[in-house]
């Protein structure tokens, strides 16, 4: 498994959580929620790409 991807996802999570706390302290809860949603979407896109690679590898192993 590519360990760099795990570190990227963890870095995005830490960055989003820090920015989320800053925005909540400033009284901007709506922007904090939107930022969290954007972070989740970015991580999901990264995971979807990995799942696509997995299916392509499985397909090539079984010759489909």
Image: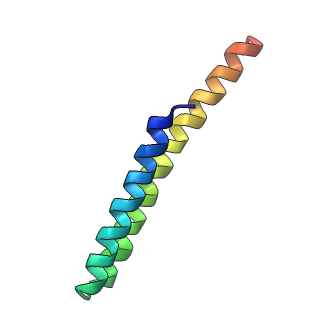
30 horizontally vs 63: left or right: left
Residue ID at (26%, 77%): 22
Q: Describe residue 27's horizontal placement relative to residue 2 as left or right.
A: left
Q: Nearer the viewer, residue 6 or 29?
A: 6
Residue 48, quarter of picture: top right
Which residue is situated farthest in the bottom direction here? 27
Q: Residue furthest right?
A: 62
The relative height of residue 14 versus residue 3 in the rendered view (above or below) is below
- The residue at 38%/54% (across/down) is 12
Colour scheme in use: rainbow
Residue 35 in picture, x, y percent from top left: 34, 67
In the rendered image, the quadrant that contains the C terminus is top right
Placement of 56 over or under 61, stated as above or below: below
What is the quadrant of residue 27 in the picture? Answer: bottom left
Residue 25 vertical position relative to residue 56 in the rendered view, above or below = below
Give the x, y percent position of residue 4: 44, 36
Residue furthest toward the left? 26
Count up the numbered dots.
0
29 sits to left or right of 56: left
51 with respect to 7 (left or right): right
Q: Residue at x 38, y 75 (%)?
A: 33
How far across and down, in percent of the image, does residue 45 sit?
A: 47, 46
Quadrant assignment for the N terminus: top right
Q: Residue at x 31, y 83 (%)?
A: 24
């Amino acid at each position: 498994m590519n360990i760099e991807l795990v570190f990227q996802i963890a870095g995005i999570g830490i960055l989003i959580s820090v920015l989320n706390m800053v925005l909540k302290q400033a009284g901007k809860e709506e922007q904090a929620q939107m930022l969290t949603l954007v972070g989740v979407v970015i991580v999901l896109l990264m995971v979807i790409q990995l799942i696509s690679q997995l299916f392509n590898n499985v397909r090539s192993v079984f010759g489909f």
